[in-house]
Amino acid sequence: MSTRPRTPAPSTPAPGKLALPELAQMKQRGDKIVMITAYDAPAARIADEAGVELILVGDTAAMVMLGHESTVPVTLDEMIFLTRAVTRAARHPLVIGDLPFGTYEVSDEQAVGSAIRMIKEGGADVVKLEGAGRMVSRVRAIADSNIGVMGHVGLTPQSATKLGGFKAQGRTSDAAKRLYDDALALQEAGAFAVVLEAVPAEVAERVSHALAVPTIGIGAGSGTDGQVLVWHDMLGMYAGHTPRFVKRYAEIAGEIGDAVAQYASEVRTGAFPEERHTYGISADELARFDETISAGG
Ligand code: KIV
């Protein structure tokens, strides 16, 4: 049974931008929604040209871009800086600015203030935050401020310590029911979509069926309305732990490593730069230059 979502926050997308209602229409049509993370302009441009619907400037930036051990340390200023780079390059996909840990938990006012900064300073189209419970009220406050907000339940990395580590969630009947209720509560509060992370496929499928708004899965099987993967994970660019739900579509780190090693070797042997990488000067100008420097001028 699906409960009715609240009217999504009004959006005024730029021409050519995906509009929020189109996501709900995709769900109704059964068209899968493609979401990927990006943290800089070149990645955003590639994702845009590949035709993805959603780009998440995720707080995974803390780990894959900034070298932290978890997502917790990244600040709102850092997330805004990265989001600005992405929004300069992403013309068609909707850009979601992830609110990092500590920027929305204290109060609804704090959450709305952080969301406004992400939109105004980062240029994000919408925001995302993790959790349910008290966070449902944060989602409602942000949506009531006319900012689109995406929910995120299941494995919520910002609270991994409380969850007992980076573990799959919703694996008992009680836990699955809590997750189901949380997703419905986020929808009722005004979330335009909900990420389901590290959740049994059967549970994710039932949640997706119950919700009128789209679900975006990561480690949640194929029954969600869309999928998201982290850029560095799916391209083989992250040296840390890779969860089992990641499919690596490329091994870019290896290719980059080979290229840098070849560059280093060619610099050392003098094989690089070649004539074709070099600017010239006419013989006359060079002769005059030589005269000037030999005269000490
Ligand atoms: O921060 C992030 O990249 C995320 C995705 C894993 C959904 O939240």
Image: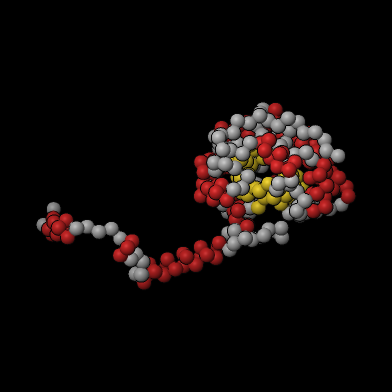
Residue 197: x and y in percent read 73, 50
Residue 263: x and y in percent read 42, 66
In this image, 282 relative to 56: left or right?
left
Residue 293: x and y in percent read 15, 57
Q: Residue at x 56, y 47 (%)?
A: 48
In the picture as drawn, the residue positioned furthest to the right comes out as 173
Q: In this rendering, does residue 245 appear at all? A: yes
Residue 247: x and y in percent read 67, 60
Q: Residue at x 72, y 36 (%)?
A: 191
- Given residues 15 and 215, the one toward you in this image is 15
- Given residues 288 and 64, the one toward you in this image is 288
User: Which picture quadrant has residue 207?
Assistant: top right
In this image, 275 relative to 208: left or right?
left
In this image, 80 relative to 188: left or right?
left
In the picture as drawn, the residue positioned furthest to the left comes out as 295
Instruction: Judge whether 215 appears above or below 189 on screen.
Output: below
How is this picture coloured?
Answer: secondary structure
Q: In this rendering, does residue 102 appear at all? A: no
User: Which picture quadrant has residue 221?
Assistant: bottom right
In this image, 14 relative to 161: left or right?
left
In the picture as drawn, the residue positioned furthest to the front comes out as 29
Instruction: Judge whether 180 appears above or below 189 on screen.
Output: below
Q: Residue at x 36, y 72 (%)?
A: 269
Q: How many marks?
A: 0
- Given residues 157 and 256, the one toward you in this image is 256
Instruction: Judge whether 103 appears above or below 49 on screen.
Output: above
Q: Residue at x 55, y 49 (%)?
A: 49
Give the quadrant of the N terminus. Answer: top right
